[in-house]
Amino acid sequence: MKSRKKGLILLLSVILIFSIGLLVNNLMTNNKDTAKPKKKTVAAVKKKKETPPKPKEPFNIDFTGDIMFDWDLRPVLAEKGMDYPFDNVREELKSSDYTFVDLETAITTRTKKVPYQEFWIKSDPSSLTALKNAGVDMVNISNNHILDYYQDGLLDTTAALRANNLAYVGAGKNEDEAYQLKVADIKGNKVGFMSFCHFFPNTGWIADEDTPGVTNGYDLNLVEEKIKEERAKNKDIDYMVVYFHWGVEKTNTPVDYQTQYMKKLVDDHLVDAIVASHPHWLQSFEVYKDVPIAYSLGNFLFPDYVSGHSAETGIYKLNFNQGKVTAHFDPGIISGNQINMLDGSAKTAQLNYLQSISPNATINSNGDISAK
């Protein structure tokens, strides 16, 4: 019995010793494997070829001066239709990539007028169909006639513009809308537009937090501040166009504050082009540090009793290509209650006149405008 116990104990001892030995051997083997530095496997990384961004398409924008459908135009429009004044320029305006005009009128049927104006201008809502048919895309409404029929007339105007899918800048139901930068996508290019009024008959016309009105263009610091604020909200725009309603009526050259504004905005890199109206005459053109300036585009659609410089008009075309903006002007004349483009000696005469009042630009026989 004792010998059996001794044998069993011996067998268990052998098994235990063998198991311990096996365990120790495994541990040592694992440690050796751990101690060996592992070879790093470097995966072959294929470098992707960076595709350069596709250049954006060049495009153009047509600009015109003041447009209205009132006074002695009313019987003509009633007889011949709202489209009649544009018969000779419609195809040109529609052929451009974008068209911007100054809407020098309230669009309303109201009759109550502000008492302090010398002239009042309103046009029928149906007139906007003629603008659409002529290829107009955006209008400036920051001018000295947009509130001729009070704030209600302004709100009628903005409602009618929205109903006709016409963009607008420079006025609105409050200051946020009035100063809002409007972006147009033209052939994949984002163009920002803002407008400022430097001529209105009453300070009550200025839009504020909860009052309809126009933008205030009398303070250059405010103008710069608003442009900077709006550009900060729209950092992806490719070009910035600022429109002004300013200057002295029936003059053909800018006054000091206009050139001061222009230089400050250009020097501070806030604009790529400045276009303007109000004097009812064409004024000088300029190219300052590669930025084209049109100080006034005069009248575009007014009754045909306008004459002389008040009847001189035209289409100002800006061409945009890879960050560069160039200018061109096609002369015209208002006659027979229509806008008519000039050719031959009449075209040459008007271009020569414009050159004579534009000391800081060169205008060639085709109407191309460049720096002097």
Image (tube, grey):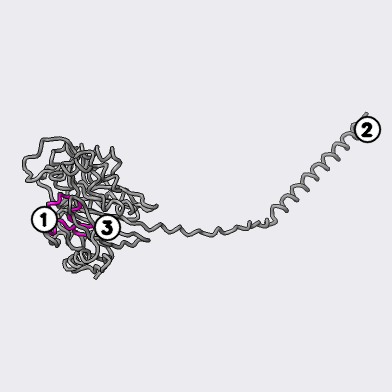
Rendering coords of residue 56 (x, y %): 41, 57
- Name the residue beneath numbered marker 3: 271
Relative side of 366 to 185, left or right: left
Front in this rendered view, residue 193 or 260: 193
| Residue most extreme to the top | 1
Select label 1 or label 3 by which is in front.
1
Q: Is residue 220 visible?
A: no
- Measured in 3D between alpha carbons, the distance from the residue under mark 1 to the one under mark 2, in whole angstroms, is 134 Å
Q: Earlier in the sequence, mark 1 or mark 2?
A: 2
- Region in magenta: 294-314
- The amino acid sitting under disc 2 is Ser
When asked about the image quadrant of residue 7, the answer is top right
User: Vertical placement of 99 versus 293: above or below?
Assistant: above
User: Vertical placement of 103 versus 289: above or below?
Assistant: above
Q: Earlier in the sequence, mark 1 or mark 3?
A: 1
- The amino acid sitting under disc 3 is Val
| Residue most extreme to the bottom | 372
When asked about the image quadrant of residue 273, the answer is bottom left
- The amino acid sitting under disc 1 is Glu
Rendering coords of residue 290 (x, y %): 28, 65
Residue at (26% x, 65% y) in the render: 369
Residue at (9% x, 39% y) in the render: 114
- Measured in 3D between alpha carbons, the distance from the residue under mark 3 to the one under mark 2, in whole angstroms, is 111 Å
Select label 1 or label 2 by which is in front.
1
How packed mark 1 is, by other alpha carbons closer than 10 Å (few <14, some 14-19, many 20 or more), is some
The quarter of the picture where the C terminus appears is bottom left
- Name the residue beneath numbered marker 1: 249
Q: Earlier in the sequence, mark 3 or mark 2?
A: 2
The quarter of the picture where the N terminus appears is top right
The reply to whether the magenta stretch includes residue 54 is no
- Name the residue beneath numbered marker 2: 3
